[in-house]
Image (spheres, rainbow, N blue to C red):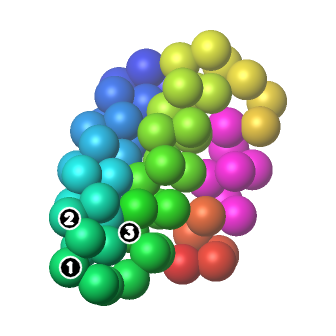
Amino acid sequence: MLLFSILVALIGLALTAGGVYLLSLGGSLYYLLAGVVLLLNAWLGFKRHALARPLFALFLVIT
């Protein structure tokens, strides 16, 4: 779970940074929100919280 959380955090950071840039150009809010959700998911995964897996599944379904 730790390796997966690190990977999710890295992807979340990239999506958040890209989302901020895209939003500054007048683009979609989706990437910023997706990055924040993935960062939250990584944090929950590091803490081994029970909501980590359902949150990730919900993220995939919504995406």
Which residue occupies the foreground of this view, 27 or 62?
Answer: 27
**Residue 31 disc label:** 3
Q: Residues within 10 Å of mark 1 (few under 14, many from 20)?
A: few
Give the secondary structure at mark 1.
Answer: loop
Among all residues in the image, which is located at the extreme right? 50
Task: Give, as a three-letter code, the residue at label 1.
Answer: Leu
23 to 19, vertically: above or below: below
**Disc 3 to disc 2, how far (Cα)?**
10 Å
Horizontal and vertical percent position of residue 6: 34, 28
Residue tagged 1: 25
Measuring 49% from the left and 33% from the top, which residue is drawn there?
Answer: 42
Give the secondary structure at mark 3.
Answer: helix
Measuring 29% from the left and 60% from the top, which residue is drawn there?
Answer: 20
Q: Main secondary structure of the magenta part?
A: helix
Residue tagged 2: 21
| Residues shaded magenta | 52-58
Residue 55 falls inside the magenta stretch:
yes
Horizontal and vertical percent position of residue 45: 57, 27
Task: Give, as a three-letter code, the residue at label 3.
Answer: Tyr
The answer to whether one can see residue 11 in this image is no
Q: Residues within 10 Å of mark 2 (few under 14, many from 20)?
A: some
Q: In which quadrant will I find the C terminus?
A: bottom right
Horizontal and vertical percent position of residue 14: 23, 50
Measuring 61% from the left and 53% from the top, which residue is drawn there?
Answer: 56
**Disc 1 to disc 2, how far (Cα)?**
7 Å
**Disc 1 to disc 3, how far (Cα)?**
13 Å
20 to 61, vertically: above or below: above
